[in-house]
Amino acid sequence: MKKRIVPILISLIVTLFIIRSITRTASSVGNWYRGNTHTHSLWSDGNDFPEIITEWYLDNNYDFMALSDHNILAEGEKWMTLEKVFERQDVEGPTAMEKYLARYAGTDWIETRDNNGVKEVRLKQLSEYRSRFEKSGEFLIIQAEEISAKFEEHPIHINAVNLQGVIPPVKGTSVRDVMSRNLQAIAEQEKMTGEPILAHVNHPNFHYAITGEDLAHVTEEEFFEAYNGHPGINHLGDDMHPSDEKIWDIANTIRLAELNGPPLLGVATDDSHTYHGGDASPGRGWIMVRAKKLEAASLIEAMRNGDFYASTGIYLDELSWDNVSRTLSLKIRPDGDNTFTSELIGSRTNYDPADKKTIGEVLASHEGTSIDFNVSEDVLYARVTITSSRSASNPSYEGQMMQAWTQPVGWK
Ligand SMILES: [Zn+2]
Ligand SMILES: [Zn+2]
């Protein structure tokens, strides 16, 4: 009798162990890659050359980046007058052109011409400059566009990252209709080319154009900017409007409670425009993606699985979700003598739609760098916001502290 029970017990334990390791690691294979998916250059309304901006990201420990100019890709012949390049600059000091000339001094890289007495410079295409910076497995440039549509006075901007051809903004009959139609145009290109495109709705509080309710109801939408580093986008909201973070909770609560749809996932981006000391500078917000390879398709697949977090200065050494024990585990990378507060935020299944306090409430809070949150069964979802005791080094709003945001769990 004993002889038979022992092998059965052993195989049972092994099976349980395998099941457990599958559930734990199903979404956690790969390396962490740091990237920014929202940046502007002279190709639209940014004030520096794409090569100089790309080099900035390369030098500042990013693994991937996307220049996402408004309604344009860096392709085709585009000449700009030196006067126009200069006008973009908002502070004193060496000009973009002077720095560009100095950077490529002694080479024939820069092309200028005299056009009827007007001096012009040609903007380099992505296909021309990408090989100067890209290195397999080390640094990746992903083609992107900020599709900049609007409804009446409401700007509706959606980043399409890894698109294969320009997508002109589509008009519509309401904020939700414009969002929906532009996301459909992105989905159509993805279907046609077979190349995945990451689409994220940008800065909902810019001109207070897009509400949490709007984000909830446009169900084609998978990602939005939980943080955008441009100082003009009303990240914190005001007396009349909820913050970007609260908007995230409103959208996800409606999605899960009323629409039976998956929650929105949140990215952090720079939306940088100024590179000479102006106020929309790079380096403020990024994502960390756990992907098998540093390739666009692999990064997008991981993001669709929710295997990433958004950050403005905090790094995680561990992030895992165990769907069986409903445990969300984090290890925050220590940073000098900074302290960290991690809040588990979510809505309970019995939340009150009329009481905003019950939408995205703080379910638990922990100090320290090693945390296991247990997510109870009575929530629609839960996510974590981590806040450091250290101020952001280049804040986009007054009093900004370094933060990180993990994706919603516990909703499947
Ligand atoms: Zn925008
Ligand atoms: Zn932008």
Image (cartoon, rainbow, N blue to C red):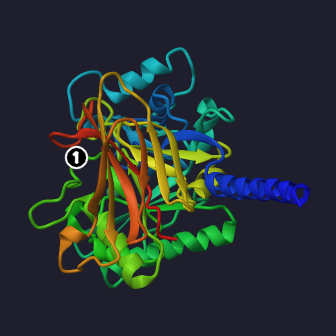
Q: Give the secondary structure at mark 1.
A: loop
- Where residue 174 sits in the image (x, y, percent)? 31, 82
Q: Which residue is mark 1?
A: 231
Q: Height in image: 101 above or below 10? A: above
Residue 137 picture quarter = top right
Q: Residue at x 58, y 46 (%)?
A: 290
Identify the amino acid type marked 1.
Pro
Q: Please identify the quadrant where the N terminus is shown.
A: bottom right
Question: Residue 400 appears at what percent x and percent y?
Answer: 21, 40
Left or right placement of residue 160 versus residue 366 in this view: right
Q: Give the x, y percent position of residue 313.
A: 36, 36
Report the residue at 11% width, 67% height from top: 240
Q: Position of residue 148 (x, y in %)?
A: 37, 63
Q: Nearer the viewer, residue 46 or 199?
A: 199
- Total marks drawn? 1
x 53%, y 54%: residue: 321
Asked if residue 390 lies left or right of residue 145, the reply is left
Q: Is residue 334 in view from this perspective?
A: yes
Q: Residues within 10 Å of mark 1 (few under 14, many from 20)?
A: some
Residue 320 lies left or right of residue 257; in this view the side is right
Residue toward you, 237 or 175: 237
